[in-house]
Amino acid sequence: MVVQALAPRGEPVAIMKDPLGNSFDFCYQCGLCTASCRTAFAMKYTPRQVMNLLQLGCEDEAAASGSGMLCTACYTCTFRCPRGVAVTDMMAAIQRLNLHRKHADRDIRRFYLSFMRTVERHGRFHEVEFLARYFIPNPILLIEEIRLGLSLMTKGKVNLNPPKMKSRKAMAAMFRKAEEIEGRP
Amino acid sequence: MAESKNDVKIGVYVCHCGSNIAGTVDVEDLTSFAQEQGSVAVARNYKFMCSEPGQTLIKKDIEELGLNRIVVASCSPRMHEPTFRRVCEDANLNPYQLDMCNIREQCSWVHKNGATEKAKALVNAAIARAFYLEALETREVPVTSAVLVVGGGIAGIQAALKVADGGRKVYLVEREPSIGGHMIQLDKTFPTLDCSACISTPKMAAVKSHPNIELMTYSEVVGVQGYVGNFKATIRRKPRYVDESLCTGCGICQEKCPWKAESEFNCGLAQRKAIYTPFPQAVPNVPVIDPEHCVYILRDGKCGACLKFCERGAVDFSQTEKMVEVEVGAIIVATGYDLFDPSAISRLGYKRFPNVITSLEFERLCNATGPTSGHITVNGKEPKSVAIIHCVGSRDEKYHTYCSRVCCMYALKFAHLIKEKIEDAQVYQFYIDMRCYGKGFEEFYQRAASEGVNFVRGRPAQVTDFAMTPEEKGKLVVVCENTLVGRLMRVPVDMVILCPAIEARADAKDVARLFNLSQSADGFLLERHAKLDPVATANDGVFIVGCAQGPKDIPDTVAQALAGAAEALSLIDRGSVTLEAATATVDETLCHGCGRCEEICEFHAPTVRLNGRLIPVSSINEALCKGCGACAVACPTGAISIRHFTRQQILAEVEALSGVPV
Amino acid sequence: MSYVYYPGCSLSGTARECEESIQAVMRTLGVTWTELEDWNCCGAAVSTGVSYLLSLALPARNLALSERVESDLVTGCSRCYMNLIRAQHYMQHNANLKDNVNAVLAESGVQYSGKARLRHLLDVVINDVGLDVVAERVTRPLAGLRVAAYYGCCQGLWTYAQFDSVEDPTCFDRLLATLGAEVVYFPLKTSCCGGTLSMSKREVGSKLIGDLLLAAVAADADCIITACPLCMFNLNSFQNEAGRAKGTKFHIPVLFVTQLMGLAFGLPPKTLGLHRNVVPPDPLYKKIAAGAAVSSAEAVASGPK
């Protein structure tokens, strides 16, 4: 049996560097979000349970559970929540924590960060660069995708060309500025 | 007043109100500040000015120091102006020489910093105004000894009976063809499982036979004029096309009528005839003819079966709408509630699947006088498993934020009734909280649990007919999370009962306008004070009882109805009402008779007429005037002023607040 | 009505057939637009997991660019649409947030004022062009073709809320019915396909895709029609994995909405990118031809109108 140490409430929870603040405070644990969630069955902590953990200041535990990663941002929970809790955005917030506090496994971290890196460098998603960044450190992953990759290639759906965005240099500046304003959770 | 400036002696009393004021305002500092102001003879502060010792403090000062103005710096005048006015009267000081200064709701309750400074400014202004206050005389007007009760549900019925038993005349107006309201639609009532009709029909019959009650069904109040103690209400009596004095209630017209329509009483689950009484125990037991479905009316004289078969010749198509005027001293509004329409929440399947029904529809199914004679069936089949979903439209930001109070209890009642009527039935309650707060309620919950009702704590996301396993084929599946165990569930059932929110009537806004009432944010009619004055309203003499004021069960409704009756009887037995003296007055020498005051007044107080003069002038009916000041503002010549809020008094306040001489 | 078009990153690669069919169909409907110049990635489903501010700034930049050219910004990708309108909505309700976003955008020389007007492809087709015009362009009514209209998920709260119902949208049904198709009862029509989980957590994604395919099979649908390129990708590319997850075999064609519209308009399948669909839609061609033959025979039999 684990005796939970509750985090002191006072300062807004660290993950909430966004203005939605603590809307999870309103949650009365009805479970409608979880019942509406298509991926809740695979989560260690369902969205409702995540809200409860956040209410009690246990955001690290929520982040480490990986539930944030399973959220597809379909917003059904947020739409239906009877208390107006921004559930989807809370799930995204703990996913950010998951990534930046390095709870996520390396492959998942690399998936997210590789994607963003190509956007930072080219302004648009660069398929080839993403594939290189994501698969090369763990080539086993590539083997699972060979069938899909070939199928896409034969149908002309793999764009090998780099994107041609004029202001791509400005994108890196934008990324830096965002990090400066936000800090990292 | 034949007193000179030097004769004015003001007493200033600062209330701590416990820590409500003293917690934020430095009351000692405020008192010394007040003492320094001109014409202030004495300034004191005390913990609770409205209490007995506080009041005595003021009285003693008036008597011993010869004070002729009182300023009380405390809560809102809406709380205690009457209290302190009485204190003045007890000490032989005219009550209109009291000025109340609100340093609580408008100061200490809303500011953290600067509250003392603001309080000083407010008290300074109040003192400046008090200097110019004049003694005013109030008037007494007699009260009409009759009561109008609007709405013939259990609330209206109970209120009417109690007032009538008190020896006063009651006009009971009900818009449907029969009294009974929603209560008569119910089967059994919680927690005693009394049969609803068995307990309400005797009261309905008592209403019919009571010598003091004039029952007007199939009628609506369309206009109200007047003021407390002296209301005039106009009632539209819709034509029944049946003569009430001739009809014996034999029912043969209903038998012979060939034309059908949806039965509103049975929530559309059954049909009625074009000539109909809504249910067999209707009071009065006189049918009405529905002009939208009666072929005689629609097709100019075709049919006429009822005419032919009525042995008493009671059917009378020549009837027309009649307007009736009644004079009453008090009005009790008991217009009841509507049920939220769950088809707005389409994922729960109401109106999409025939075996998803509302609680009221289920009451009709259970009821022996209902469309299935009390058998719980859907499309002829008896359900072996039933889901009851709580909080449909309640406790939900998108529909109604409030809790509807009665649903948890009637859901338990349904569970019991289903298990009683259907052998081996499985009942699932999908709830968030079980609210069983009343007398006998928790015990009823225990009883339901002991009968093997399944409780699943989780708000269902949807009711679907899409089967994912063989067990789900042909059934409705309730999808939810069992929050107590933390498990997702799909529960296949044969029938789903929704507990929709109790909401304010669709025309609550019109009712509010008619009786000059306010609505609270949730749409129900607003009481004067949530705790201490739950049936009175801001409109003196008009009382709200029952679900018109907010969702509640039958015991609470009856209690409120009796409270409303007490209020009405108290008003009437007093015999007279004191009119507020702070009303508008016209200086006829300045009035040109332009009529702008008449146009702007909501209460029809000013009338412009030749008062034996060459030009018409405005004359204010002080009984109707509420002293709001709109006419004084609209008057282009400044002929109208409001007593107790004269230009001189108000400008003195402004000057004191701004520091700028006006 | 002047439009500017936001293609989004996937439409040039994995969703190439969606892009091709969109262009072909909009041309036929007489809608012209230019591509938004210098557009950037909207952040897809990834940016919210990395940075809140970027997840709003990336789409906001595109909104700001569209304000410069004073045109309605149209996108055919639902994920892009959601990111764009979400940014717009949040900034509208929070001045501090808007300031922060603009501080980031300043690095790229643009500013967002809040005047941008965002449109979804379906909205433009149904409400601007109008279903009557669509009906006029139909030369080969899809009589007898049973289609499952799959609305997708995030579109609900953000898209359909603008011009239809969130929980029970019907605009797509009406469009497909205008094409002459028989729209089947599809209770999972707004149920999420799993988004990027098909790639990042395939065991979960396959289950979700499997449920949708099962529902289509249960409704006896000939094909599933979707309005989202990501749903298109998922439902097409993982039918084997979904079949394994559900203990069955799936082989049901999944078309993008403009692909089906193009077929009804009589456009050649190659211009609609139909040869690129992972699940070949060839069985549909025969059915459409047969249906057209029946309906024209009926028209002949009933005589001139």
Image (cartoon, rainbow, N blue to C red):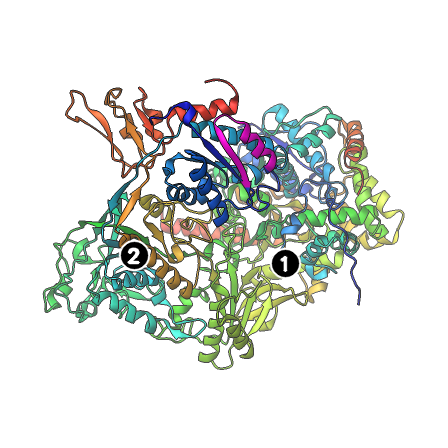
Chain that bears disc 1: A
Magenta segment: B28-45
Which residue is drawn at the image coordinates 21% and 64% (left, top)?
Answer: B287
Q: Give the residue type at disc 2.
A: Leu
User: Residue most toward the top?
Assistant: B661
* Element marked by disc 2: helix
User: Counting other residues with Cα less than 10 Å from the Cα at mark 2, is it few (<14), some (14-19), or many (20 or more)?
Assistant: many
Which residue does the numbered mark 2 point to in the structure image? B569
Chain that bears disc 2: B
Query: Is B83 contained in the magenta span?
Result: no
* Element marked by disc 1: loop
Most foreground residue, B603 or C124: B603
Which residue does the numbered mark 1 point to in the structure image? A29
* Nearer the camera: disc 1 or disc 2: 2
In the drawing, what numbered circle is on residue B646? none
Q: Position of residue B580 (x, y in %)?
A: 33, 39
Most foreground residue, A146 or B227: B227
